[in-house]
Amino acid sequence: MIVVSALALVTNAAALTYIIIQSKKRHINPYKTDVFVNQKYYKDAIARADI
């Protein structure tokens, strides 16, 4: 269980780091706007949601 917990912690830290890097690169506030609006998967999800 310790190994699984450590892997989960490392994965979450990597995801948070990636979000911070992307938001600083694009000069946006991730609390106010979406970070991944320019990615293909985001556009596909929005098209499926009929927004």
Image (cartoon, grey):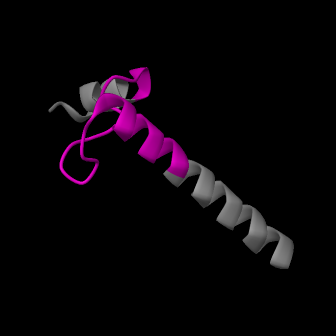
**Image coordinates for residue 26, horizontal then vertical, percent:** 31, 30
Quick check: 41 above or below 12?
Answer: above
Identify the residue at horizontal 26%, vertical 41% (top origin). Answer: 34
Identify the residue at horizontal 25%, vertical 39% (top origin). Answer: 28
User: Magenta region: which residues?
Assistant: 17-41
Is residue 1 visible in the rendered structure shown here? no
Question: Is 7 inside the magenta-drawn segment?
Answer: no
**Which of the pair 46/7 is nearer the observer?**
7
**Which of the pair 42/33 is nearer the observer?**
33
Q: Is residue 7 left or right of residue 23?
A: right
Q: Which residue is situated farthest in the bottom direction here?
A: 1
Q: Is residue 4 left or right of residue 37?
A: right
Quick check: 51 above or below 1?
Answer: above
**Which of the pair 16/7 is nearer the observer?**
16
**Image coordinates for residue 17, horizontal then vertical, percent:** 53, 49
Is residue 7 visible in the rendered structure shown here? yes
**Image coordinates for residue 41, horizontal then vertical, percent:** 42, 27
Q: Is residue 46 left or right of residue 2?
A: left
Q: Quadrant of the C terminus?
A: top left
Q: Quadrant of the N terminus?
A: bottom right
Identify the residue at horizontal 85%, vertical 71% (top origin). Answer: 3
